Amino acid sequence: MRKTECLAMILAGGQGSRLKALTKTVAKPAVPFGGKYRIIDFPLSNCANSGIEKVGVLTQYKPLELHNYLGSGSSWDLDRTGGGVFILPPYAREKGADWYRGTADAIYQNLNFIDLTDPDYVLILSGDHIYTMDYAWMLKAHKANNADVTIGVFEVSWEEAPRFGIMVTDKETGRITEFQEKPKEPKSNLASMGIYIFSKPFLKKYLEEDGVNENSTHDFGNDLIPKMLADGARMFSYAFDGYWKDVGTIESLWQANMDLLQDQPPFDLKDDKKRVYSSNPSMPPQFVGPDASVRQSMINEGAKIEGTVDKSVIFQGVRVGKGAQVTNSVVLPSAVIEEGAVVNYAILAQDVVIKAGAKVEGKLGEITVIPEGAIVNA
Amino acid sequence: MKQVVGIINLQEDNSLIRELAATRAVEALPFAGRYRLVDFAVSNMVNSGMSLVGLLLPDFSRAVLDHIRSGKDWDLARRREGLTYLPAALPDNDSRKGDLKDIYANLDFAELSGKQYVLLTNASYIYNIDFEKVLEFHKASDTDITMVYSVVNANRKGKSMVIETNEQGKVTDLAEVTNIKAGQKMVMGAYLMPVPTFAYLVRSTYERGGQDFLLDALLRRGNEFKISAFEHKGYFAHINSTLGFYEANRDCLKPEVWEELFMNNERPIFTKIKDEVPVQYKETAEVKNSLIANGCEIRGTVENSIIFRGVTVEKGAVVKDSILMQRCNVQEGARVEGVICDKNVIITKNRWLKGAENYPYIVTKNARI
């Protein structure tokens, strides 16, 4: 296989149990977001827009829909000759088969794939964050620092800091001096974004050690990063100052959707250089009926809106009947909200039917989730 | 349908639709917010199970080539078969007019395809059909050629081919008229016949000086063949005038037409994929009875209109009874009513433009008003 400078590996096996009903049939990276996207569209599009031609996607939990969605990678322009998307589920070897035991183990089990593509650098990404970023700049910083590891960091508020893996850095050089996993008393407010660039031989050495260490949990944050720090490796932070959101919970997923509805959204989905690609259904422009009212909302193709939609994100093929009201909600593909029904502070999964006159009402901080295919009667 | 090769004729006469088709073939005209006319012809063939399709290119072919490219978005970029472009014949000494010379020049495509039948269609018609039914009908009738027709429901201007049929569904008369009346049977530009019949018809007509497939081959020599007619009962439109274009677009605002043409799960209409963002409706948006394509940002009022991909309607702007093509920008306080704006038109602040119901005002590509 042709040599590649930087290989990206996306960890897409997460179950996303905190997303409850939304991950009953799909892995977290396949959860729909923003009217037409799925979470994994963001790292994949970022790779495509950063000039990365080879991307391994490590899948494990309920991978069928995700595999189907990725297809040949053509949606992200990643169906390249000698490159593109490689789907990497766990597989059996001479000594039997293993599930991926942790984030580091997932990469460890695919070391032969990494050797095959022969990269100088390996970019590790996770499949559960919403952001648009050009990794080429981060790689440039990695090279300029002559680093072993570069970790993407994002400034969070001091109140939030205890929820993240925190990097304590030297202010001038950005060199990481200490790592605190979910600290009660954070010494810094720079959170790890779960984006790592490793120089390949360095990564390989540590993975091989970790792979046979029975006391390890095989996790980058828990095991490898602390070990590397202890060994005095050249570890640098790369600060990202754009929009970045972890969408691991129902509330944060809902909030990230709502963020798109601001008059000037916090990140520009229309920017040609940062275009987020997605698999496109063949559906017509949306139809907005004579009695409809639509405000502060994002609506995708194939939707038919005959009622009121306010502060909501509506996916393709959704139908909102006459007199129905949808507010502060996220409605996933092909859901139907019949005449006079009311939906407020809710996430309706695919193919949900809200019968005429029925009500689904959550509230701020307690978003109601209706699972895939459910029918809600009046 | 695997035994049918498709040829889509993109050489429609554009004289009645000058303003919009001056720099592009009629078949490349944008339609219903995100499509081009040719999408219907190609999608119909693909959805009917055909896998070998040739596009007979028009004189201005850039828009079509840029739109279709490898045919991938229609699932026609295949290892075997798929999409083929059939270029126009080189002009020779007796350079003739009409499409027949181009069909003649590309006869190899059909003859060497190894298929049994040819389906020739014209991409200036809007309809969603399963051609499998036409093939079954053809096989069941004792006939040489099958035409697809529809009964018109209102008088319309513009050149149309009409037929009369007997009780057995056989065509007894064929004529080209300039005005069509309600109740007449209008041919929808689709003809199915065995490859040898097609080759014989084209070759012998061309070699005897024929110029136009419809007029010289089918119309003049219709009596030499057994011709049957298959009725398409659903929605259809023929885009052969500016008014026809405006009305067909507006027909898509009828929910039943929108559903029939576009929301059929078995037969979606494919088009070039652009990865646009879902439509963004802002706080001041006021949208009624309209089709809005992805990539639009709406802050103003939109009524009874068709808005293509990437259009912005700013605060206080009003768009009524209009068609705004890709990337138009209606600025604050501007007002357009009964207007067709071609691509990239900018209506600057507080300008008013008004056309009439039966005579939409047309703003040409890239204009700034």
Image: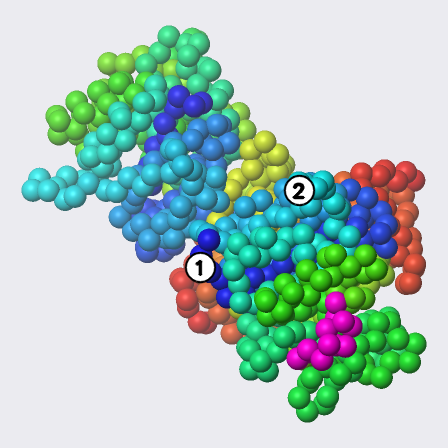
Q: Name the residue located 89 percent from the left edge and 52 percent from the top edge.
A: A368
Q: Is residue B85 above or below residue A206?
A: above
User: What amino acid is labelled 1 in the image?
Assistant: Asp
Q: What colour scheme does the image use? A: rainbow
Would residue A286 be seen by someone viewing this image from the given angle?
no
- State the extent of the magenta-drawn residues as a range: A224-235
Q: Secondary structure at mark 1?
A: loop
Whole-percent x and y of residue A359? 90, 47
Q: Name the residue located 48 percent from the left edge and 22 percent from the top edge.
A: B132
Q: Residues within 10 Å of mark 1 (few under 14, many from 20)?
A: many
Residue nearest the observer in this picture, A80 or A267: A80
Q: Nearer the viewer, mark 2 or mark 1?
A: 2
Residue matched to label 1 = B342
Residue farthest left in this picture = B93
Q: Quadrant of residue B159?
A: top left
Q: Is residue B145 above or below residue B278?
A: above
